Image (cartoon, rainbow, N blue to C red):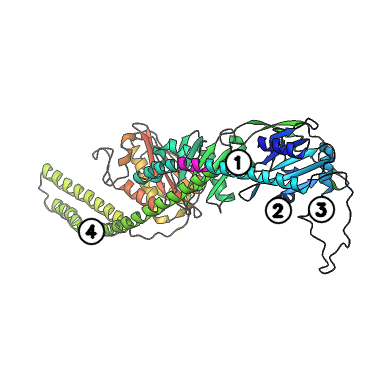
């Protein structure tokens, strides 16, 4: 560019020749300059996009050479004003002798130039920049010299295009290697997010990012210098609402589009994001930190002069410095292309695994139906024999009045064991039937439901001293009968496992978070060791001795199945001797996907 500026200045005799390039916002920067000292230097100065508006840029793209030999010219009208055949004015867009805008002539006078010539730098069919020539006095040039300048600038354009393609190709090769490693890790991992996390540095290097975050099915994973989870979720929410039609999005100035992003612009001024699911809010987002830089403008770019209803160009071209904030290094086309390629690979892997899961699900559903039918049959057939055992044991005790105390103790043990086995069979029957029970979804008043359950549980606990703290609960969306079973089991457990406390303290609360409804029950009972929390919701899994606390070991498994059938989740936390907390989440009707507790 410097060699081109110097050559054209020597060839044409203009006082100053600038090579002027546009950025992504059409602001211009003087990248090279040659002159004889008659006009001030503009090297490295920037000029706002308003100096060369869109219609002027379109004209530069269609007509590459423009010459104004004397800014003080007197325009001559065309006679006749209208074409006699078409009755339309003559189109002078591509004419070298056409008059120019009065605003542009005023701009030239304010700049101190009496003559100018511009030659467009076109790279791959797009206006990349200009070679701008200025003189302090009128300066005319012949056609041959103008053609020579055009040829020279075309040579520069080809050189710029070749270098850009070379850099882009080199970058694509390196990014291709990184993408290959990412694909290998995703294909061999148990899930694509886990595969990407395993090669986290490659994920960041793929687009030269400072940090990254993955949100899929509500699960949040962060890498590198990333934002806090709540800020990332705010970005995802903004993408889902304001950019919902896009599969990918990138900007180096997020704060200019998302107002709330100003609060974390220092850590994430630039983002590149790809959508990984059409059904759920699932995104992979890369972040770039803010890069504060000082820009030298040729005059104040924010100053606009208006007089007599017409906009006038600014008069000052003195160096005006501005410190630019909330911008990151811009994303290159090669980086954005690599991000799109990764998205296509993720979607391909997700689809392939979805097909595998669909086939596996079909097999599991068939097996589950067989198991449910078997458990239903066994449970149903066992109910009558256990009732017979209890009934005949009671009849025997009443008939044989002469039995000693040990014999009566044996009969009592037979009855109690048969009753316990009967309760177990009933619970198993309920558990097996739940998989086939249809769910009738509607609004459920959880306050009324919890109140009824507490009264029911406390019928047999009249002598207990319990402090209840029940907050106002949000309305749920689900099957009232099944949700009553959830509350009954949770409340009964809280009462049962806190019976050694005086007073026992049980609290129930609820809240709404985004598009999920969260419910929580806490007690101050015996608690449990978190090392065994994974067994808590399994069938026949007990964390307390059977002789200490009655129960069949199926209640919490039943609770989890009901919650999951509502597309919700449940979790527990506790500490030995200090109580336990159970939290379950249910989705609202608007939510797509599972609600996370």
Image quarter of residue 583: top left
- Residue 339 picture location, percent across and down: 49, 45
Image quarter of residue 360: bottom left
In the image, 10 versus 2, the foreground residue is 10
Lower sequence index among marks 3 and 2: 2
The residue segment tinted magenta is 167-175
Give the quarter of the figure containing the C terminus: top left
- Which is more foreground, mark 1 or mark 4? 1
- Is 219 situated above or below 433? above
Element type at mark 2: helix
Look at mark 2 in the image and give the residue it sits on: 62
- Which is more foreground, mark 2 or mark 4? 2
* Residue 203 belongs to the span the image colors magenta: no
Residue 79 appears in the picture as rendered: yes
Look at mark 1 in the image and give the residue it sits on: 254
In the image, 59 versus 54, the foreground residue is 59
Residue at the image position 38 percent from the left and 40 percent from the top: 572
Look at mark 3 in the image and give the residue it sits on: 98
In the image, 366 versus 313, the foreground residue is 313
Q: CA distance from mark 3 to mark 2?
A: 15 Å
Look at mark 4 in the image and give the residue it sits on: 374
Residue at the image position 71 percent from the left and 51 percent from the top: 58
């Amino acid at each position: 560019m410097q060699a081109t500026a110097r050559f054209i200045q020597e060839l044409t005799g203009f006082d100053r020749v600038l090579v002027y390039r546009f950025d992504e916002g059409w602001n211009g920067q003087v990248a090279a300059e040659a002159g004889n000292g008659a006009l001030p230097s503009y090297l490295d100065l920037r000029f706002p996009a308003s100096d060369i508006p869109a219609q002027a840029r379109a004209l530069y793209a269609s007509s590459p050479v423009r010459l104004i030999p004397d800014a003080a010219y007197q325009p001559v009208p065309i006679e006749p004003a209208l074409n006699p055949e078409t009755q339309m004015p003559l189109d002078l867009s591509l004419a070298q002798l056409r008059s120019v805008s009065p605003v542009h002539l005023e701009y030239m006078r304010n700049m101190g130039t009496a003559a100018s010539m511009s030659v467009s730098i076109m790279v791959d069919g797009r206006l990349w920049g200009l070679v701008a020539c200025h003189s302090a006095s009128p300066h005319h040039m012949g056609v041959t010299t103008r053609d020579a300048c055009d040829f020279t600038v075309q040579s520069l354009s080809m050189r710029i295009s070749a270098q850009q393609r070379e850099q882009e190709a080199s970058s694509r090769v390196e990014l291709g290697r990184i993408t290959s490693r990412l694909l290998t890790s995703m294909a061999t991992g148990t899930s694509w997010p886990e595969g990407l996390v395993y090669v986290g540095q490659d994920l960041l290097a793929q687009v030269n990012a400072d940090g990254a975050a993955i949100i899929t099915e509500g699960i949040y994973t962060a890498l590198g210098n990333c934002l806090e989870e709540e800020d990332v979720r705010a970005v995802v929410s903004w993408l889902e609402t304001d950019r919902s039609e896009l599969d990918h999005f990138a900007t180096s100035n997020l704060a200019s589009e998302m107002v709330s992003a100003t609060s974390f612009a220092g850590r994430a001024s630039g983002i590149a994001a790809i959508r990984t699911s059409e059904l759920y809010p699932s995104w992979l987002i890369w972040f770039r930190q803010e890069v504060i830089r000082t820009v030298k403008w040729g005059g104040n770019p924010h100053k606009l002069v208006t007089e007599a209803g017409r906009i006038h160009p600014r008069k000052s071209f003195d160096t005006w410095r501005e410190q630019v904030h909330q911008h990151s290094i811009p994303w290159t086309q090669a980086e954005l292309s690599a991000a799109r390629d990764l998205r296509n690979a993720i979607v391909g892997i997700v689809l392939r695994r979805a097909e595998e899961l669909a086939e596996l699900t079909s097999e599991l559903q068939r097996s589950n139906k067989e198991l449910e039918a078997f458990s239903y049959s066994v449970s149903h057939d066992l109910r009558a024999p256990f009732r017979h055992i209890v009934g005949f044991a009671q009849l025997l005790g009443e008939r044989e009045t002469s039995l000693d105390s040990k014999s009566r103790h044996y009969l009592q043990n037979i009855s109690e064991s048969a009753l316990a086995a009967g309760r177990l069979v009933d619970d198993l029957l309920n558990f097996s039937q739940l998989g086939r029970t249809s769910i009738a979804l509607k609004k459920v008043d959880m306050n009324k439901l919890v109140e009824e359950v507490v009264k029911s549980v406390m019928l047999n606990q009249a002598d207990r001293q319990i402090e209840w703290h029940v907050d106002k609960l949000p309305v749920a969306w689900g099957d009232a009968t099944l949700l009553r079973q959830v509350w009954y089991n949770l409340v009964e457990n809280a009462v049962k496992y806190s019976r050694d406390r005086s007073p026992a303290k049980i609290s129930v609360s609820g809240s709404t978070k985004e598009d999920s409804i969260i419910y929580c029950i806490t007690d101050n009972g015996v608690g449990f060791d978190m090392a065994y929390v994974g067994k808590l919701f399994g069938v026949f899994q007990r964390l307390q001795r059977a002789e200490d606390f009655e129960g069949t070991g199926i209640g919490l498994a039943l609770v989890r199945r009901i919650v999951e059938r509502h597309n919700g989740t449940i979790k527990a936390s506790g500490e030995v001797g200090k109580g336990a907390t159970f939290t379950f989440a249910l989705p609202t009707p608007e939510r797509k996907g599972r609600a996370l507790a």
